[in-house]
Amino acid sequence: MYALAAAAGLLILLLTPAFGCAGAPSHDRKETAAPEPPREYVETALVPSSGHLIRVRDGDDLQDAIDVAQPGDTIVVDAGATFKGPFTLPKKSGTGWVTIRTSTPDKQFPPPGTRVAPSHAPLMPKLISWKGEGVVLAERGAHHYRFIGIEVVPSEGTYLYSLMWFGTNRERTVEELPHHIIVDRCYLHGDPKKGSRRGVALNGRHLAVIDSYLSDFKEVGGDSQAILGWGGPGPFKISNNYLEGAGENIMFGGGDPYIKDLVPSDIEVRGNHLVKPLRWKKNEPGFEGTQWSVKNLFELKNARRVIVDGNVMEHSWEEAQTGFAVLFTVRNQDGNAPWSVVEDVQFVNNIVRHSGSGITLMGHDNNRPWEQSQETKRILIRNNLWEDIGGARWGGRGILFQMVEGTSDVRIEQNTGVQQGYTLFSMGPPHRRFTFRSNIAPHNEYGIFGNDVGVGVAALDAYFPDAVVTENVLAGGEASRYPDGNVFPDSLDAVPFADRKAGNYRLTGGIKNLKNAGVDASALCAALSPPDAREQPICTERTADTRQHRAVASQ
């Protein structure tokens, strides 16, 4: 994707000593600006019904019930029954909620805050459609609908474009967009053989997908997602879901909004499990025979004020893209939205693993002149665990962090990474006000590398001239090539992890004079959803005999 220096020139650069501190004198450096948090949040607490109960039994007309329901009414749909759509959510006057829910009693169904699974499908009614657009669609201005315990799926053997459409991106004003719609403890899945392009299109205001299970969103030759939003201003909430998508499991942006200056904003992505099943990957046991167009796990192309906190993201391999798990890549996708931007993003307390590379940040859309997109800025990447990044199984270059095209105010701190390639790779115009602090990762061959300039201080001076790079543990690196204040043990074996081979990266001892290097396991595990936290070795108290580790203090 990005050209590296010629081998001969690179060898000369690597053999040339570099001394001193990178960047401007400390008194000239400006503090990295912090991201602005969301200004609005989606409220997803259950609101008690204030209206009538409408019972829809097997063979009844669900659309008729939706049409006649008034704000405050609850539509109770027979569990185990199948209802043929598509279904349309009409705009109604008033602000009471219309709830469409399973007939399974609350005491027999997972309670709020509990993620459902395919095993709960018998407790749900099933909504299907054989038409190309979707199963559930919202009219312009439709609002205050909540789905609880509903299975949504294409008719057998049918490819659908989106199962649930909340805004089509054909709305011309914010007032026309659907708003206040919640998908709660639902099971959405594409056809196992033909797939579907996406589960939910979030193109409105105050939209949420919570405690749900979305699977088999896949396509050959096109982008597919579990959840995608590009034409609504937000706020959005995606919380405690299991999400499968071949192209991108979650993405914001990727299409030009019709509404001028619209940027999807005020986005919460918390406690989800994003995964590409290995049955989609060639040469893996259980491969089903179709190579779907696999790209990445999470991507922002046009988004503002985003919190990505407490998620597990796994399995992203080199196929339709180069294998990066996470992309903050601003795109004026079709050339009609020069206001496109990625800014004010907090990527914290996540586990990212089994991927070709880690995360890439792009400062401007490199497919277009710089003035046709805005600068990527105010990005915080803190307290994440990056495990099994790169290698023959996943492809890619094994890059932990990549930064290109001139960002500003990016802070990468307190991460633990286990990657096979670069620790930090950069190219393009320089990045301003960059902080790289308290991270633990192997240096490998090139460590912090600048394209066409080399390793360490040379890379920092060229691409991060006012950077703060300190208190990092770069195992296997050479101290003479880096600014003072960093630590270089011989290898990761010298770092006192509880049990690195088992995936427990808790530190059982100090690292020289560093106080907060690497991931804070307690904070990480507290942010994960319970079903995911229970599966993580780092979230257990089991530790190995620390006498196995050599003291890093001696390095």
Image (cartoon, rainbow, N blue to C red):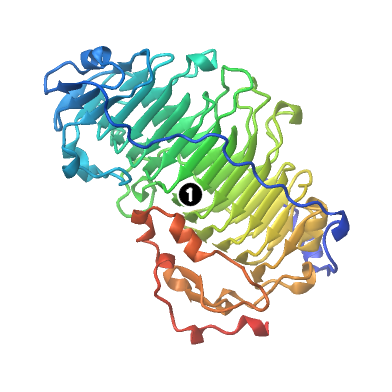
Q: Quadrant of residue 423?
A: bottom right
Q: Nearer the viewer, residue 52 or 101?
A: 52
Q: Residue 178 location, x and y as percent?
A: 43, 20
Q: Residue at x 28, y 26 (%)?
A: 99
Can I make out residue 497 in this image?
yes
In the displayed structure image, the side of residue 488 where residue 194 appears, left or right: left
Q: Quadrant of the N terminus?
A: top right
Q: Residue 462 location, x and y as percent?
A: 82, 53
SS under mark 1 = loop
Q: Residue 286 location, x and y as percent?
A: 30, 51
Q: Residue at x 36, y 55 (%)?
A: 530
Q: Is residue 416 above or below residue 192?
A: below
In the displayed structure image, the side of residue 323 where residue 85 appears, left or right: left
Q: Nearer the viewer, residue 369 or 292?
A: 369
In the displayed structure image, the side of residue 502 where residue 375 appears, left or right: right
Q: What is the residue that sits farthest to the bottom in this orientation?
A: 547
Q: Residue beneath label 1, please? A: 317
Q: Nearer the viewer, residue 36 or 437?
A: 36
Q: Residue at x 69, y 68 (%)?
A: 471
Residue density around tag 1, few if under 14, some if 14–19, many if 20 or more, within 10 Å = many
Q: Is residue 175 above or below residue 431?
A: above
Q: Quadrant of the C terminus?
A: bottom right
Can I make out residue 218 in this image?
no
